[in-house]
Amino acid sequence: MDPVTPPQRRPRDRKAQLASLAAGLFRARGYHGVGINDIAAAAGVTGPAIYRHFADKQAILAYVVLSGIDDMNAATAEALADGVPTGDQLDRLLTLLAAQAVERREIAALWRWEGRHLPADERREIRRRSGATLGAWTKALLRRRPELPEADAELLCWATLSVFGSVSVHRTSVAKKRFVKLLTELASAVLDATLPESPVPASPEPPGLGTPSRREQVLAAATELFAERGFHAVSMEDIGAASGIAGPSVYRHFPSKAALMVAIGHRAADRLAVAAERALKASDERDALRRLAASYVHTLLRTPELLVSFTSSSGARVSMPDRDKTELLRVQRDYVGQWIALLAAARPELPAREVKIIVHAALTIANDLSRTRRVSVRPHLEEELTALLHAVLGISSR
């Protein structure tokens, strides 16, 4: 008799498996670069099989992001439970969160970059759940550091979240146990950081003379719209309307949205290069790195092209000619390479891979907090971000 093949059963966690596969594809290709059939192919099923679990691609993204936040909430509840000694709560929390970040690197990437593709009600739910979690962290930090104003404690907690989220912007890795310990140490450095007290405000920069050229106006309008809505949600007609011209007239200055993105990327790179050249005129590597961190924050807060370039053009999120994409990535890597070389020289005890992880954590804090509405309006944010970067890099002057 022929053996009877038992019927195959669908795994109980099929929905979570599909979501996990989709999360990896979203991170690798960008939300717009992935279709339902791509997810089905990765899972070895048909497209209709995906729809048994999710209504559409947005539903998959929402499931992934919200489940990641729920995991963070569960870790927070476990670490801050009444049975855990107060002195140990934050340490336990950071370890749990670091482990989650290492194990599910793609979740932070989707939360940070792709959440804007979700409907307004789900974006509100993300903000509600994450806000409640940050509130619990803030209360725990105030129990450890009661001298802090609540707003300062909240700022430090946002920066801590960025440390964990930084694992999504690079592929450098170390042994899991060490990776978790390193992220925990960096997060602790943030929570222990001393923020500057009411620094003297810098003199405002002069507004400049004359009227920008039409090309500059188009570039500025595109930068603002890309930052607000994302590259794919903006049309050439939108850019024309924002710059006061008809949509087709934009093509006189830029042949495509991709060409605009390339111009934005080069503008950002040029401004960073100039700032870095000034910063590197220092007495030693540690001083140069402090100055480089300060120059990055200063330029970031005054150059909207930077955030648009460093988020929208990463990976495959923007369709542009391969040559331009390769060149922009090279420029970005060269710039980050300056940080890595300086930190390696300033702290020779650090292994090479850990140097890269630390640099990306510092840069992510600046990138995230400069566009986080709750903290971006702080009057002394530039000095505070600089102090936080110094703390993460381990080069604080104090």
Image (tube, rainbow, N blue to C red):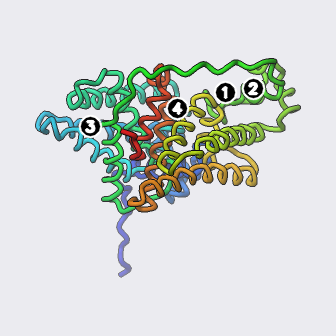
Q: Residues within 10 Å of mark 1 (few under 14, many from 20)?
A: some
Which residue type carries mark 4?
Leu
Tell me the CA gap for discs 2 and 3: 43 Å
Residue drawn 13% across the image and 39% down it = 84
Which residue lies under the disc numbered 3?
Answer: 76
User: Looking at the picture, does residue 123 appear above or below residue 255?
Assistant: above
First along the sequence among labels 2 and 3: 3
Which residue type carries mark 3?
Thr
Q: Secondary structure at mark 1?
A: helix
User: Looking at the picture, does residue 258 appear above or below residue 126?
Assistant: below
Which residue lies under the disc numbered 2?
Answer: 239
Q: Residue furthest front?
A: 283
Point out residue 331 in the picture as x, y percentages from the top left corner: 66, 50
Q: Residues within 10 Å of mark 4 (few under 14, many from 20)?
A: some
Q: Which mark is residue 225?
A: 1
* Circles 1, 4 touching at the beta carbon (< 8 Å): no
Residue drawn 61% across the image and 49% down it = 335
Q: Which mark is residue 118?
A: 4
Tell me the CA gap for discs 2 and 4: 22 Å
Which residue type carries mark 1?
Leu
Q: Which marked residue is nearer to the observer: mark 2 or mark 4?
A: 2
* Circles 1, 2 touching at the beta carbon (< 8 Å): yes
User: Looking at the picture, does residue 161 appear above or below residue 102?
Assistant: above
* Circles 4, 3 touching at the beta carbon (< 8 Å): no
* Circles 2, 4 touching at the beta carbon (< 8 Å): no
Point out residue 226 in the picture as x, y percentages from the top left corner: 65, 31
Q: Secondary structure at mark 2?
A: helix
First along the sequence among labels 2 and 4: 4
Q: Quadrant of the N terminus?
A: bottom left
Q: Quadrant of the C terminus?
A: top left
Point out residue 284 in the picture as x, y percentages from the top left corner: 51, 50
